[in-house]
Amino acid sequence: MTSEEQDAAYLALPKGLSYKQAAEALGTSMTTIGRIRKRLGIVRERPWKIPDETLKEIDELLKDGESIASIAEIVGWSKSAVRANFPGRGWTPAQKSAHMVKQRQANRRLY
């Protein structure tokens, strides 16, 4: 199939198909579906979009020194979703290490 034929065949498919479903319908690979979509200017939407009010809450929690993991638990979103919206704003390796040391010390006192 030529590029134009692939594009036309893709556009004829029902809306909302996954890459895998579209590839099976056209008898091609998911990589080819990705190329077709790129050529047509169809961008893949993010599967999640954190609401603006939650982003503000996350920003405040980061300013207060909370970790990405604890923020994700507080706001009910995944760590990767939080991290994607605030790149470079998590704890440094030194901060993570210091936190782990404090946790271990606290756990030892419990037992």
Image (cartoon, helix red, strand yellow):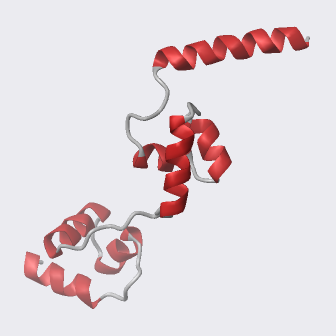
Q: What residue lies at 25% left-to-right and 65% top-to-bottom?
A: 34
Q: Where is residue 27 in the image (x, y as percent from the top left)?
A: 29, 75
Q: Position of residue 88 (x, y in %)?
A: 38, 34
Q: In this view, does 74 lie above or below 46?
A: above
Q: Where is residue 92 in the image (x, y as percent from the top left)?
A: 46, 22
Q: Which residue lies furthest to the right in this view?
A: 111
Residue sitting nearer the eye, 102 or 29: 102
Q: In this view, does 67 lie to the left or right of 102?
A: left
Q: Position of residue 32 (x, y in %)?
A: 23, 65
Q: Is residue 3 left or right of residue 12?
A: left
Q: In this view, does 110 lie to the left or right of 46?
A: right
Quadrant (top left, top right, bottom left, bottom right) of the C terminus: top right
Q: Residue 16: in sight, yes or no?
A: yes
Q: Residue 2: in sight, yes or no?
A: no
Q: Is residue 27 left or right of residue 97?
A: left
Q: What residue lies at 53% left-to-right and 47% top-to-bottom?
A: 58
Q: Is residue 33 above or below residue 71?
A: below
Residue sitting nearer the eye, 13 or 58: 58
Q: What residue lies at 19% left-to-right and 71% top-to-bottom?
A: 36
Quadrant (top left, top right, bottom left, bottom right) of the N terminus: bottom left
Residue sitting nearer the eye, 15 or 23: 15
Q: Is residue 89 above or below residue 13?
A: above
Q: What residue lies at 63% left-to-right and 52% top-to-bottom?
A: 75
